[in-house]
Image (cartoon, rainbow, N blue to C red):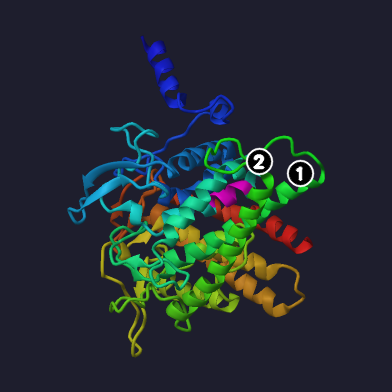
Amino acid sequence: DIENELKQVNHDCHDNIKSSDPRQRIGRFLYLEGHEYLMYNTYDVHFYASFALTMLWPQLELSLQRDIIDVVASQNNQMRYLIAHNDLSERKVKGAVPHDVGSPSGIPWKIVNDYVFQDVSRWKDLDSKFVLQLYRDFIATEDMNFLKTAWPAIRSALDHLNSFDYDGDGIPENEGFPDQTYDIWIAKGASAYTGGLWLAALSAASSIADILSKEIQQKTETSECDEKVFHTEEDFNNDDSRLLQELQESKQKYQNLLKRGMSSYTKKLWNGKYFNYDASNSPYHDTIMADQLAGQWYARACGLPPISDEDKILKAFTTVFENNVMGFKNGTMGAMNGIRPSINGKDAQVDKSCIQSQEVWTGVTYAVSAAMLQESILLDLPKGLKESDVQAKELRDKAFRTSEGIYSAGWDKLGYFFQTPEAWDTHGHYRSLAYMRPLSIWSMQWALEVVPHIWQENESE
């Protein structure tokens, strides 16, 4: 009967989870990427949407993240043909963060990566997004046990991504296929999007290592070290002194990588006004990408330092606003993903190198707005400078003008308010209704409600 079937489903969902795991009490959570993309907890997109769960149901967010943590160390050597290039690819590579945790037609949680378009084990955003989300969720919940549980997976994910730094410049290289959430938009070499995410993730990982180190030191000093810090990782040495040494070495490693990577990021991508799309020799390498500062967005949301000089960050946001927002339909449809720079006085044009470069992504527009809001809040912190006050107000106005375009188009003009899509093109035609990414509007609330407190605490320390 139905009752027995429900009991069996519940058992299947929890049979591999220890009795002490919070998921036994909280439960587990799945949600679809959208009506057209039937995958659960699509992680590159959840990166944007996760602010909603973090702010509204933080324990469900931690439950979802624990499911991802569990999968990082797993491997599934099933070989599958990928749709994009008809290549064979291993389903799940050890150390790589999964793209999704399955689909309705599969076995969620147990068999992951139902996505078969590109090789997600070689994507350059998933691992960084994993580290950044975990740190953000720790800030929201202050759950030290969660952070301790996540640490081995954090190290594995960063090691996996760092293996793609072929030239040793501190930034993993995109490999000439769409190896990130923009899965039709090709990038090669260092890129603004995944490079910035990597820098922010290194900063977050360094901070995590520092937090865990201080936790061990505090326990040692107060003689409350009866329990070991780690309980579940068999391959992780439980001796506190050795763990402390490893955390401190990891912190130094990530700081060194960050320093080298920041230098390369600026040298290879900064052009005086914004960060180029990538460092390739493509005629589209200098496209103005609306989402170029996704790493900065998360860094500031977590109270971390900027991924580049602050003046460059502000110039880049101004360029995005003038070109991707106001330069497209006068700001009435949101931020266009890709805009070609103006040449010889000609008006800037939409980048038509692929479908995704010529779309407005609703969730990305909200994320850009949130990132601008955060910068305006930081400018508004007590400095006693009228110039900063003026800059802050201007940037705040730009932030709300940016997100206003989604309301103007999606609600007033196109009628998508009942199921906000992933994207619309220059004519307002949608792609993928009821999509996950627009939940990033909650990152604007995070910027207004949480970020000021984070930075006030930082200032007082």
The three-letter amino acid code for the residue at tag 1 is Lys
> Quadrant location of the N terminus?
top left
> Quadrant location of the C terminus?
bottom right
- 367 and 285: which is toward the camera: 285
Q: Is residue 396 magenta?
A: no
Mark 1 surroundings: few (<14), some (14-19) or many (≥20) residues within 10 A = some
Residue 103 percent coordinates (x, y): 33, 36
Mark 2 surroundings: few (<14), some (14-19) or many (≥20) residues within 10 A = some
Residue at image position (75%, 64%) is 459
Q: Is residue 387 left or right of residue 193?
A: right
The three-letter amino acid code for the residue at tag 2 is Val
Most common SS among magenta residues: helix
Give the vertical position of 356 relative to 281 (above or below).
above
- 331 and 91: which is toward the camera: 91
Q: Which residue is mark 1?
A: 219
Residue 66 percent coordinates (x, y): 51, 39
Residue at image position (55%, 73%) is 308
Q: Which residue is mark 2?
A: 229
For the record, the magenta segment spans 133-138
Whether residue 400 can be seen here: no
- 288 and 396: which is toward the camera: 288
Verify CB contact (< 8 Å) between mark 2 and mark 1: yes
- Helix or strand or loop: what does disc 1 sit on? helix
Q: Is residue 136 magenta?
A: yes
Q: Quadrant of residue 314?
A: bottom right
